[in-house]
């Protein structure tokens, strides 16, 4: 049985080998499905990360949320306590390079938002299974956040990120919906 690290490496390699055109086309289809989902339509406040590399591009999602007058919140990693803190984002100018080179909100330019104020969290990850479990980048930040979060969750992924037989540990948290370029999965 593969370890989480082996699964992560395998899928990240598959994503690297994909052509830019194919990647962009698949991301567009995923975003279109997201915008049709009831979870998206009814949310007032959505939490998203700023995508990097071969993650489903979130800047167009953020722009669409603003256009639809939704509140957008993005996480900042508190590496000392290994937790996520969310801040309202109303402009990309509020971002700065932070933890692991991620684009994060500048707390001096942003208002802190508490988990109870977030309706929908778009949870990032690298590898997913049909039960809603995911393998992220290994820090456990989202599992800790989700363990006390009561809002709706979903993940956006390319179908090549959907695998079976991934290891699941007691602290792993599931997401409520998976959206790929081919299907919507409700575990």
Image (cartoon, grey):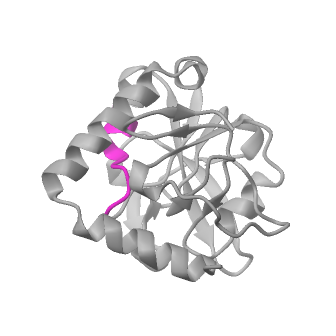
Where does residue 30 sit, x and y in percent of width and height? 37, 36
Where does residue 34 sit, x and y in percent of width and height? 45, 30
Tell which of 105 and 83 is nearer to you.
83
For residue 122, side relative to residue 141 (left or right)? left
Q: Is residue 50 above or below residue 137?
A: above
Where does residue 171 sit, x and y in percent of width and height? 82, 66
Where does residue 15 sit, x and y in percent of width and height? 32, 64
* Residue 64 seen in render: yes
The image quarter in which residue 154 lies: top right
Q: Quadrant of the N terminus?
A: bottom right
Residue drawn at point x = 60 percent, y = 58 percent: 164
In magenta segment, residue 57: yes
Residue drawn at point x = 53 percent, y = 25 percent: 40
Residue drawn at point x = 77 percent, y = 39 percent: 116
Q: Which residues are magenta?
A: 54-63
For residue 4, side relative to residue 22 (left or right)? right
In magenta segment, residue 42: no
Tell which of 110 and 56 is nearer to you.
56
For residue 159, side relative to residue 21 (left or right)? right
Q: Quadrant of the C terminus?
A: top right
Residue drawn at point x = 37 percent, y = 38 percent: 181
Tell which of 141 and 155 is nearer to you.
155
* Residue 53 seen in render: no
């Amino acid at each position: 049985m593969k370890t989480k690290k082996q699964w992560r490496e395998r899928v990240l390699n598959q994503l690297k080998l994909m052509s830019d055109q194919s990647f962009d086309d698949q991301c567009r289809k995923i975003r279109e499905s997201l915008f049709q989902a009831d979870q998206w339509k009814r949310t007032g406040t959505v939490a998203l990360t700023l995508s990097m590399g071969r993650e489903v591009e979130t800047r167009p999602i953020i722009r669409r949320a603003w256009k639809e007058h939704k509140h957008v919140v993005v996480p900042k990693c508190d590496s000392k306590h290994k937790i996520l803190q969310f801040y309202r984002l109303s402009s990309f100018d509020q971002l700065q390079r932070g933890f692991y080179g991620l684009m994060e909100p500048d707390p001096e330019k942003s208002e802190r938002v508490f988990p109870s104020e977030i309706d929908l969290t778009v949870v990032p990850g690298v590898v997913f299974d049909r039960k809603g479990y995911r393998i992220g980048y290994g820090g456990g930040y989202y599992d800790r956040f989700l363990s006390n979060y009561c809002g709706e969750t979903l993940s956006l992924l390319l179908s090549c990120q959907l695998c079976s037989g991934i290891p699941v540990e007691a602290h792993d948290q599931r997401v409520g919906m998976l959206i790929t370029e081919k299907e919507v999965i409700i575990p």
